[in-house]
Amino acid sequence: MKKYLHIGVFLTVIFGCSDDIDLPVAQEILVVEGWLTDQDTIQQVRLSRTVSFESENSSTAVSNATVQIRSNLENYELTHVKNGVYQSMVEFAGIPERSYWIEIRLEDQTITSNKEIMRTVPTLDSVYFNFFRRQSELNPQLEELVYYPVGYFSDNGEEQNFYRWKFKRNEEPFAEPEDIFIQEDRFLNGLDSIKNEFTAFEYELNDTISIELQEISFEAYNYLRLLRLQTTSLGTRSGTTPSVVRGNLVDSSNPSNLILGYFGVISTTSGNRIINP
């Protein structure tokens, strides 16, 4: 939740990838980015608008909205602090099995997200590391060791689950589109001590590996899957045809208005390990 994947950059790539065409007048589309967690903390959401093709900025911050995170039993108002970031005035946590949504009032718009139920993520049993060898780029005659994280957890066999894995190296998050790593339990349902190896996330000796396992909804899983597909395959020969990735937000005052981004709920568990010889 502390780092945001800026959807405005994604739109700039999609609509700016052709040459010698008359570009349409750019819309300033509202983008909502935020996740309510089950951790007792200051919760936050980011609001921005997409900008014109000629702009040097990827988005503009929205500072004049009224933002509330709601459930059937509670209502938390968020206050704008800076750069389009809105924060709760008190620390609070999402409660398991309770449904939450966001409501945003902005000028003549009322934007709401679909309701999502807070699930309980399984415990991250342990964090380890492994390595592989490859030819050194600095000296092709030498081999180098590349370390990567390994995480174990046990799946709840009573329901279908969807997960997101997030990683940090020495407290610096892997935050590129290709670092979105999601998982469903279709072939893992009810299994214990499931070993997950993440060879795409590279570390060096004495680095600290930090892993966060999140339980997300099916809708969030599908949104992140499409977002990763669109942002990592553009410009490749087998790339996906560019299209707008719709989230779970709607302008109830005018449903035809396009709202980008996503607001969802996540339960989290985490662990870390230092890579020692």
Image (cartoon, grey):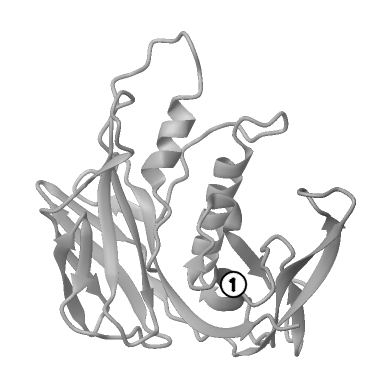
- Residue 233 is situated, as x and y percent measured from the top left of the image, at 63, 39
Residue 236, visible in the rendered structure = yes
Nearest the eye: 46 or 112: 46
Secondary structure at numbered mark 1: strand
Q: Residue at x 19, y 59 (%)?
A: 104
Category of crowding for the residue at label 1, using alpha-carbon neighbours closer than 10 angstroms: few (below 14), some (14–19), many (at least 20): many
Whether residue 149 is situated above or below residue 274 in the rendered picture: above
Residue 188, visible in the rendered structure = no
Q: Residue at x 55, y 66 (%)?
A: 218
Q: Is residue 136 left or right of residue 71?
A: right
- Residue 246 is situated, as x and y percent measured from the top left of the image, at 44, 47
- Residue 11 is situated, as x and y percent measured from the top left of the image, at 42, 36
Q: Residue at x 74, y 70 (%)?
A: 147
Residue denoted by label 1: 163
Q: Residue 21 sits in which quadrant?
A: top left
Q: Residue 146 sits in which quadrant?
A: bottom right
Residue type of the residue flagged with mark 1:
Tyr
Whether residue 268 is situated above or below residue 103 in the rendered picture: below
